[in-house]
Image (cartoon, rainbow, N blue to C red):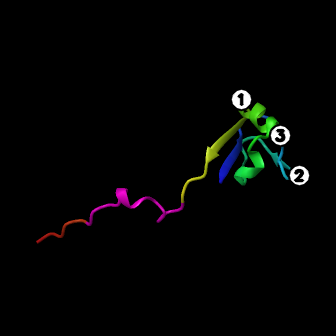
């Protein structure tokens, strides 16, 4: 799920597609469902102006791909 972060110095009122708005204080962030921001003109305008940053949420530990797994440490003899 995407993260919206307020990068401005003022309160942002961000309307969601489903209805109620999200109030973000300066520097505050909120996790929202992707369908809440898809095709939302107000969010696109805020992001384009730099007042709102849209980021991808980091995956929890343990959900990274198996291709990047670490090799066990060799034992000392």
Image coords of residue 5 (percent x, y): 70, 43
Q: Quadrant of residue 25?
A: top right
Q: Which mark is residue 76?
A: none
Q: Is residue 66 left or right of residue 7?
A: left
For the residues marked 3 and 1, what is the alpha-carbon distance in whole angstroms? Answer: 17 Å
Q: Quadrant of the N terminus?
A: bottom right
Q: Measuring 36% from the left and 56% from the top, which residue is drawn there?
A: 68
Label 2 or label 1, whichever comes before in sequence order: 2
Mark 3 lies on a secondary structure that is loop
Q: Which residue is mark 1?
A: 48
Residue lying farthest top?
A: 49
Q: Measuring 88% from the left and 52% from the top, which residue is drawn there?
A: 20
Q: Which residue is mark 2?
A: 19
Label 3 or label 2, whichever comes before in sequence order: 3
Q: Measuring 75% from the left and 45% from the top, which residue is drawn there?
A: 37
Q: Quadrant of the C terminus?
A: bottom left
Check the image and report above or below for 68 versus 23: below
Taken as a whole, is the magenta stretch helix, strand or loop? loop
Write down the region rendered in magenta: 60-72
Q: How crowded is the residue under tag 3: few (<14 C-alpha within 10 Å), some, or many (20+)?
A: some
Image coords of residue 53 (percent x, y): 68, 38
Report if residue 50 is visible in the image: no
Q: Measuring 18% from the left and 70% from the top, which residue is drawn there?
A: 75
For the residues marked 2 and 1, what is the alpha-carbon distance in whole angstroms? Answer: 22 Å
Kindly indicate whether the residue at mark 1 contacts the one at mark 2 (C-beta within 8 angstroms): no
Q: Which residue is mark 3?
A: 11
Label 3 or label 1, whichever comes before in sequence order: 3
Mark 2 lies on a secondary structure that is loop
């Amino acid at each position: 799920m995407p993260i919206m972060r307020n990068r401005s110095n003022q309160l942002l009122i961000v309307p969601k597609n489903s209805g109620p708005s999200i109030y973000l204080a300066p520097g505050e962030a909120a996790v929202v469902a992707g369908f809440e921001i898809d095709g939302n003109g107000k969010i696109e305008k805020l992001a384009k102006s730099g007042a709102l940053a849209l980021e991808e949420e980091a995956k929890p530990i343990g959900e990274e791909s198996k291709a990047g797994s670490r090799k066990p440490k060799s034992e000392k003899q």
